[in-house]
Image (cartoon, coloured by chain):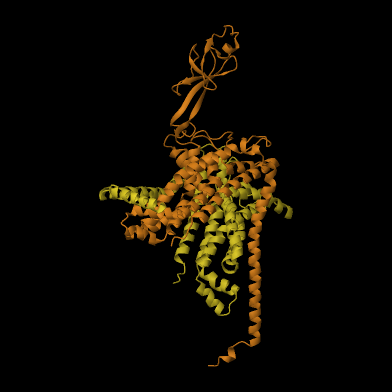
Chain colours: A yellow, B orange
Amino acid sequence: MSSNSTLSDLAERARALIARPIRSRQTLMLRERFIFLNLVICTVFSVLVTGAILSVLVSETWRFFASDEVSLADFALGTKWNPLIGKEKHFGIWALISGTLLVTVFAMMIALPLGLITAIYLSEFAPRRVRNFLKPLLEVLAGIPTVVYGFFALTSITPVLQWLHDGFNIYNAMSAGIAVGILCLPTVCSLSEDALRAVPQSLRDASFALGGTEFDSSIKVVLPAALSGIVSAFLLAIARAVGETMIVAVAAGSRARVTFDPREDVQTMTAFMVQMATGDVSNFGIEYYSMYAVAFTLFVLTFCLTTFGTLVRRRFREKYE
Amino acid sequence: MEVSSTSPSPNFRHREGRSRRRANQIFYLVCVVTAGVSVLALVALLCSIIIQGVPYLTPKLLTNGPEPDAAEAGVWPALAGTGWVCALCALFAFPTGIATAILLEEYKPRSRIGNWLYGLITLNISNLAGVPSVVYGIIGLTAFVSMFEIFGSSSVDAPAFEFGANYFDQFYSEGDQVILVPVDDPSKPSTRPVDGMAAFDFDMRPIQMHVIGTNDPLPEDEQMLAYTLLDDAEAGRINRRNWYYFRLPLGRGVLAGGLTLMLVILPVVIISSQEALRAVPSTLRDGARGLGATPWQVIWNVTLPASIPGMMTGIILAMSRAIGEAAPILIIAGIVYINRAPQHLMDDFSVMPMQIFNWTARPQEEFHGLAAAAIVVLMAILMVFNGLAIWIRLKFQKPLS
């Protein structure tokens, strides 16, 4: 009974299929063309975003330098940055770059060794069970919003630092640096691990066959073989740390100056942009356009780092057949 | 050829082997400790937030606005803002991103110029993924909020073009009631009250307006008094915006925020969709092609359905990035006091991460507690999203080859 009804069902469907009007080849081709055109438009839009970024940053930065109050030399070489206070305004980008570097150096001191060693552990040593536990955990760490890291830096890391040493300011470069480091750790780890796992097993086997320990094979064989991928992971992590905004806006402070003391408050390029956007600044003053000049500097810096990272990975990738 | 004279003694070799084994053990220990540190960091972060936030986790937190009094403050406007902005962002980013991924993966170029373009575009997209989100905020500020100032330099505050807004002159009657008189042309000076003019009360009910001279006696009847104006009453210009209100340039509104977030997550969506499409085995495509399907028929009927689970995972992860993103929104919206959910696409707004930033930046301890509670709410939302991604991955991802 039931097989009968399925049969008639099938027959019905077959009849419907046959009865369906056959589209002419021309309409079909026209539809294909139309859809292809739409896809191209979407892609062009995605590419245009880069163009928009460049044109906006260049034109507004041009306006900044067109003003009488700043010169390119002062901007590129100066070490004083006080667009908002004081009678005489100074726009020396190095005050912001040094703050950014200080935070980035601390972040990388945490993220690079920890990330790389964790990656080696995950790809060379860890038993499956540990891997299955550690990988999702790192994904969770990567998925936490950055403002949460900022909150953590200000309310947890800073008090601990102050407890360890009296000299720490409430806003300080080190606390922000540690938080940025934790943030970058999953990036370093997962990208390095991908690079390490791409090294074929035969290389490890050869190393073991020659009497190498796991340490020997991972440090002397696998690591050099995966070096391009690891360098690119490092570069991408540095770019991420340089562009990190909310952590430094919350925890690093807002005093732009050249200092190498991690206990003091510093201002990074990104934190300056946030300060400008959230403060009461007229939309057309020179200090408003200085935001674009800083954004341009930041863009060039991170763009170079990521492009270089991608190129390193593509060019120096060892190919194993 | 005397090899044996240069070979090390057996004793030496033995010791070297032992030291290498020790190095191996030490390194293994270092690995375990390092991996432990990252676990510890996560645990410390979650614990400190939960300990600080849980005492402030009340029903009021979800329903109230960000009142200046910490005991009454809540995140409802920010929560609604996050919903609006992320929905808009998804609406724009996903079709564009998936379409780009389809073009890049399914219509692979065959010519040399095509190959060169293809390489350039993929490099460009991976670069876009590395641009700091705060830079996107700055771009959004210029491209969406003020629209390159093509509508004039003051057009952010006074829109050059708008519809869906009704302008009124607002009077206060002698009985302390609000009376609204509609204005046709907002550029006209404020209306002089005339007896019997068409007017509305605060809730937009039509009323009968009475205008009396300055020296005339006030009416006794309270009902009457409520709608009585002196003929020299001063008006204030206000506007009421409908839900379909639209303006150009977009201003610091929800739409500008959503579009900016779209720019932020577009590269992520493209890259993850590309990966999902790449994971579809080519035998499926070949089969469809063998049956005479056109390229789009192959994509629409075969490749896309097969890649949807993978795509959904990437899309949901991109969404959770958009939910947590604060920097671009901070640049677009600025710090303003928002006490209600957005009413239309151009309305001022706040989002959860911004509210958290706002509270964290205050020195008082209780606002830090509120920030922690808001973080707990935000993380709960993110966990739901991530759980969804994992569920889809487990449920629908069946081996295709």
Please tell me how many numbered marks the rendered image carries: 0
Please indicate whether residue B367 sits to the left or right of residue B131 in the image.
Answer: right
Q: Is residue A90 visible?
A: no
Q: Quadrant of residue B71?
A: top right
**Is B382 placed above or below A129 here?**
above
Inspect this view and state whether residue B260 appears: yes
Q: Residue furthest bottom?
A: B1
Above or below residue B95? Residue B202 is above
Where does the C terminus of chain B fall, quadrant-wise?
bottom left
Q: Is residue B96 left or right of residue B336?
A: left
- Expressed as whole percent of the image width and height from the top left, the position of residue A40 reads 36, 50
Residue B122 locus on image (x, y percent):
42, 56
Residue A191 image point, x, y percent: 53, 61
Residue at the location (71% across, 53% down)?
A160
| Relative to B310, residue B9 above or below | below
**Does A109 sit left or right of B397 as displayed?**
right
Q: Position of residue B86 (x, y in %)?
A: 51, 43
- Is A255 or B394 nearer to us in this picture? B394
**Residue drawn where x is 59% and y is 37% of the image:** B76
* Nearer to us in this view, A122 or B298: B298
Q: Residue furthest top?
A: B216
Q: Which of the pair A245/B176 is nearer the observer?
A: B176
Q: Which quarter of the picture shows residue A141?
A: bottom right
